[in-house]
Image (cartoon, grey):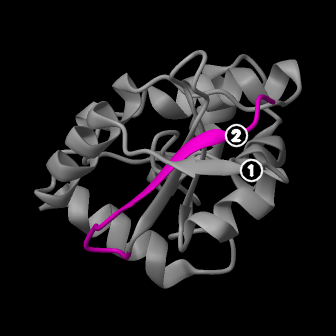
Amino acid sequence: MPSPLYAASYPTPVGDVAVLVDPASGAVVCAHVGTVAQAARLLGAGWVDRPDARVAAALAAWREGDGSGLTEIPVYQAGTALQQDIWRAVRAIPSGETATYGEIALEVGRPRAARAVGTACARNLTTPFTPCHRVVSATGLGGFGGDADLKRRMIALEAA
């Protein structure tokens, strides 16, 4: 991972989202509801303050309830081949809609891998650009990094 990364914090209705961007590829490599320092610690990377106009525009639209631009921003994160497939499938969930862990498992051709979908979502470092908040349990909301209220608010923002 090149360092320093470009970083900025953007206001959203669910809290400030700190976003780290790889300067070479322009891909989001980390997004975190919190501070830039917290996001950088997740990667063990250095950063320089430099907002990204594409990220700012996508998050501004999301503030208004349109999350469709989030998945148009390129992302990069290390993971297994299955995790990469899961994250691609998650990025295909339209804004304002949800899919279950089981549906994503079917989408990636692994019908018994709902738990693997949950694990990939838990390891996702690029939310909301890889919108794991749109993945729900067959019986309800499901988990989200220990903050079910944040997941609920993100889904509600896009449903508006």
Marker count (numbered): 2
- Identify the image quadrant of residue 27: top right
Circle 2: element type? loop
From what the image shows, is residue 121 above or below residue 150? above
Quadrant of the frame with the N terminus: top right
Q: Is residue 11 above or below residue 123?
A: below
Residue 35 in which image quadrant:
bottom right
Residue that appears at 37% across and 45% down: 51
Q: Residue 145: say if magenta.
A: no
Query: Which amino acid, mark 2?
Result: Pro
The C terminus is located in which quarter? bottom left
Q: Which residue is pictured at 61% across the width and 29% down the height?
A: 22
Can residue 143 be seen in the rendering of this structure? no
Q: Is residue 8 magenta?
A: yes
- Give residue 130's mark: none
Q: Specify the label residue 46 is tagged with.
A: 1
Give the camera-side residue of 110 and 53: 53
Question: What amino acid is labelled 1 in the image?
Answer: Gly
Give the residue at x 15% y 55%: 65
Q: Identify the residue at horizontal 77%, vertical 29% (top origin).
A: 2
Rendered view: 138 above or below 112: below
46 versus 90 height, above or below: below
Q: Which residue is mark 2?
A: 4
Q: Is residue 57 left or right of residue 51?
A: left
Along the line of sight, the residue nearer the viewer: 31 or 136: 31
In terms of depth relative to the viewer, which is nearer, 80 or 42? 42
Q: Quick one: which residue is furthest to the right in this view?
A: 80
Which of the two labelled residues, at mark 1 and mark 2, occupies the earlier sequence position?
Answer: 2
Is the residue under label 2 in contact with that under label 1 (CB below 8 Å)? yes
Q: Residue 111 placed where, x, y %?
A: 75, 29
Q: Which residues are magenta?
A: 1-15
Of residues 149 and 29, which is closer to you in this image?
A: 29
